[in-house]
Image: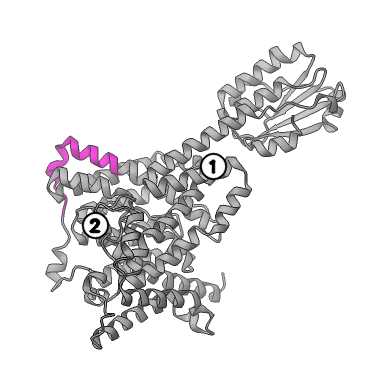
C-alpha cells in the first residue's frame, strides 16, 4: 500500500472516528439513563467498546458500545438487585460466557442469518433512527437519546411522539437542524473543503449558532435540556470516583448468574447480527470472523463490568455512521473510544454546549441512507421469497424490538423456503428427454434438510431408461436425511424405472460409495448430458429445469 493511500485512510479514519465520537456521547448517556444506571456507566461502556473491543475485533468497521437492545434487561436487573455493583458482577459473568462462546466457535450461527432478514434489519434501524431523531431535530426531547423502543418510557410511542412534536416545535433547534443537514449534504461539494469533515463543521456551526442566539438574548436559544449533558468532574479524584468495582460477594447469588447468562445470549446475538450487517455495508466487502468478535466482546464486557460500565455489543447505528463517514479500518473505532476517554476526563463542559439538534441532523442523514426507497425496490425485484421476509422483519423491528423482529423475519424466511420446496413441483417435461438421456444433478455447496423436498420431487420424476448422475464434488455438507433419500433412490426407486444411477464426488464421511468402473457408453452420455443444479434457490430452479 502506498504512503499516499495509508495517509488517505488515516485521514478518513480520524475524521470518521470524530463523527462517531460526537454521535456516541449522547447515545451512551441516553442508554444509561434509559437503563436506570449512572450516566457515566454509559461512557465507560463506550470507551471500552471503542478502545478494547476495537483493538481486538476482527472487524474493520464495526463500532461497539452500550446497546439500546439491552436497556430492558439492564433496567430490570438493576431494579431487582437494588445495587448497581451487584449488576456489574452479572456483566462480568456475561463477558466470561461470551468469551467461552467465542472459544468454542459458537459464532458459526451467524452463517445462518438470511441476507433478506439482515437487509430488513438495516432498513428498520434506518426508519427507527428517523422516527426517534425527528423530535430532537425540532427541539422536543421528551424521550431520551438512546431509547429505540417503539413504546417509550413516557407512555408515548414513536408515532404519537412525532404527533406531539408538532405542538412543541422549537424554532431555534429547527434552524440548527436544517443548517446542519445542508452542511452535511453539501459541504464536500466546496473545493478543498473536504479536509474538514462535514459533520464536525455542522457541530461547530450548531454550537456557534446557539451561542449567537444566547448572546443576543433571542428566543431562538435552545435550553440546557436540549444540549449534551455529560457528567462534569471537578477534579481528577471526582473523575476517578465515577468508576466502580463489582460486588464479588454476589458470585454466590444464582440470580446474578441468570442475568449474566441473559446478557451473554442477548449481547452475542445482537453482536453477530450487527457484525453481519456491517460487513454488508462495508464498501470493500471484507469478512469479519464472528468467533473472534465474540471473544473481543467477551473481554470488553469483562473489563467494562470490572470498572463500572454497562454491557457492550456491536452497535449498527454507530457502525453505519462510521462507514458513511468514510472509515476504512478499526483505527476509526479506536479513535472514537480514545476521544470519549479524553473528552470525558478533560473537557466535558465544552461537549455540553453541543445542541442535540445538530447531532440529530447527522443521525437523520445516516438513517436515510439505511432505508432509501431503492432498497425496497431492489427487494421487490428479487421475488416474494425475498421481499416477504424482508418486509416482515422491517415492520416487526420497528414496532417491537430488534430480537423479536429478527426472530419473526427468520421464521417467515424459513416458512417461505419450506413452502417453495413443497409447492414448487420440480417435474421434468418428459417429452423433452429421449430414452437413454443422461441427466446430471450437481448438488450445491451445502445441502440442508430445507433442500430435501426439492431433491426428492426431482428424483421421483426422472424419466425412465435414463442415466442420472448425482455429483457431490462441490459439497462441503449434506444433511443425513438427504443422503438417505439418495441411497433409497439408487437402491430402490431407480431400478424400478430402469434408471442407471451414477454417484460421483461423495466424500468418505457421507458413507455413500461413489460409482466405480463407469462404462465408456455412460461416460459419453454424461459428457453430452443435460446439466441441472440442485440448490435452495427455487426461482432459479424453476427457470433452469423448465418445469410445469
Q: Which residue is mark 1?
A: 388
- Magenta-drawn stretch contains 249: yes
Tell whether 36 sits left or right of 538.
Answer: left
Is residue 523 at least partly visible in the picture?
yes
- The image shows residue 5 at horizontal and vertical percentages of 55, 73
Tell whether 6 sits left or right of 137.
Answer: right
- The image shows residue 419 at horizontal and vertical percentages of 58, 30
- The image shows residue 546 at horizontal and vertical percentages of 76, 34
Tell whether 83 sits left or right of 424.
Answer: left
Is disc 1 in contact with disc 2, using a CB cutoff of under 8 Å?
A: no
The image shows residue 141, relative to residue 531, as above or below, that is below
**Which stretch did the figure color magenta?**
245-263
Which residue extends farthest front?
167
- 1 or 2: mark nearer the eye: 1
Q: Which residue is mark 2?
A: 32
The image shows residue 24, relative to residue 536, as above or below, that is below
Q: Residue at x 42, y 59 (%)?
A: 319
Amino acid at each position: 500500500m502506498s504512503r499516499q493511500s495509508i495517509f488517505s485512510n488515516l485521514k478518513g479514519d480520524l475524521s470518521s472516528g470524530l463523527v462517531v465520537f460526537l454521535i456516541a456521547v449522547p447515545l451512551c448517556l441516553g442508554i444509561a439513563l434509559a437503563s436506570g444506571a449512572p450516566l457515566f456507566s454509559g461512557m465507560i461502556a463506550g470507551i471500552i467498546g471503542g478502545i478494547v473491543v476495537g483493538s481486538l475485533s476482527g472487524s474493520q468497521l464495526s463500532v461497539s458500545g452500550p446497546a439500546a437492545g439491552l436497556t430492558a434487561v439492564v433496567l430490570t436487573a438493576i431494579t431487582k438487585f437494588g445495587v448497581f455493583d451487584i449488576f456489574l458482577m452479572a456483566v462480568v459473568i456475561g463477558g466470561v460466557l461470551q468469551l467461552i462462546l467465542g472459544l468454542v466457535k459458537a459464532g458459526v450461527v451467524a452463517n445462518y442469518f438470511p441476507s433478506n432478514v439482515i437487509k430488513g434489519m438495516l432498513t428498520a434501524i434506518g426508519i427507527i433512527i428517523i422516527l426517534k431523531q425527528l423530535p430532537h431535530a425540532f427541539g422536543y426531547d421528551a424521550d431520551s437519546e438512546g431509547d429505540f423502543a417503539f413504546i417509550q418510557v413516557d407512555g408515548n410511542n414513536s408515532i404519537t411522539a412525532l404527533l406531539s412534536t408538532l405542538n412543541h416545535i422549537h424554532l431555534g433547534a429547527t434552524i440548527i437542524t436544517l443548517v446542519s443537514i445542508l452542511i452535511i449534504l453539501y459541504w464536500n461539494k466546496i473545493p478543498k473543503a473536504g479536509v474538514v469533515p462535514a459533520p464536525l463543521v455542522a457541530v461547530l456551526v450548531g454550537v456557534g449558532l446557539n451561542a449567537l442566539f444566547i448572546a443576543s438574548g433571542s428566543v431562538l436559544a435552545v435550553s440546557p435540556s436540549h444540549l449534551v449533558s455529560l457528567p462534569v468532574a471537578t477534579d481528577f479524584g471526582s473523575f476517578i470516583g465515577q468508576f466502580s468495582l463489582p460486588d464479588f460477594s454476589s458470585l454466590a447469588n444464582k440470580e446474578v448468574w441468570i442475568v449474566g447468562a441473559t446478557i451473554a445470549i442477548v449481547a452475542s446475538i445482537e453482536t453477530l447480527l450487527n457484525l453481519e450487517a456491517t460487513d454488508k455495508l462495508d464498501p470493500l466487502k471484507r469478512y469479519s470472523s464472528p468467533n473472534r468478535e465474540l471473544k473481543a466482546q467477551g473481554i470488553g464486557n469483562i473489563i467494562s463490568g470490572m470498572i463500572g460500565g454497562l454491557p457492550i455489543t456491536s452497535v449498527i447505528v454507530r457502525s453505519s455512521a462510521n462507514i458513511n463517514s468514510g472509515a476504512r479500518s478499526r483505527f476509526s473505532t479506536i479513535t472514537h473510544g480514545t476521544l470519549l476517554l479524553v473528552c470525558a476526563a478533560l473537557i466535558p463542559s465544552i461537549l455540553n454546549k453541543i445542541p442535540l439538534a445538530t447531532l440529530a441532523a447527522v443521525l437523520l442523514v445516516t438513517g436515510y441512507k439505511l432505508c432509501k426507497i431503492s432498497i425496497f425496490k431492489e427487494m421487490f425485484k428479487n421475488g416474494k421469497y425475498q421481499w416477504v421476509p424482508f418486509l416482515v422483519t422491517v415492520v416487526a423491528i420497528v414496532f417491537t424490538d430488534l430480537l423479536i423482529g429478527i426472530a419473526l423475519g427468520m421464521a417467515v424466511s424459513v416458512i417461505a423456503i419450506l413452502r417453495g420446496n413443497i409447492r414448487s413441483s420440480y417435474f421434468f417435461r418428459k417429452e423433452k428427454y429421449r430414452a437413454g438421456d443422461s441427466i446430471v444433478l450437481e448438488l450445491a455447496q451445502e445441502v440442508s434438510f430445507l433442500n430435501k423436498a426439492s431433491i426428492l420431487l426431482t428424483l421421483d420424476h426422472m424419466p425412465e431408461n435414463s442415466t442420472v448422475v448425482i455429483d457431490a464434488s462441490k459439497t462441503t455438507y449434506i444433511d443425513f436425511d438427504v443422503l438417505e433419500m439418495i441411497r433409497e433412490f439408487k437402491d430402490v426407486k431407480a431400478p424400478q424405472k430402469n434408471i442407471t444411477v451414477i454417484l460421483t464426488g461423495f466424500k468418505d464421511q457421507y458413507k455413500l460409495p461413489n460409482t466405480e468402473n463407469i462404462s465408456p457408453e455412460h461416460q459419453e452420455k454424461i459428457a453430452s448430458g443435460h446439466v441441472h443444479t440442485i440448490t435452495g434457490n427455487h426461482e432459479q430452479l424453476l427457470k433452469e429445469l423448465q418445469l410445469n
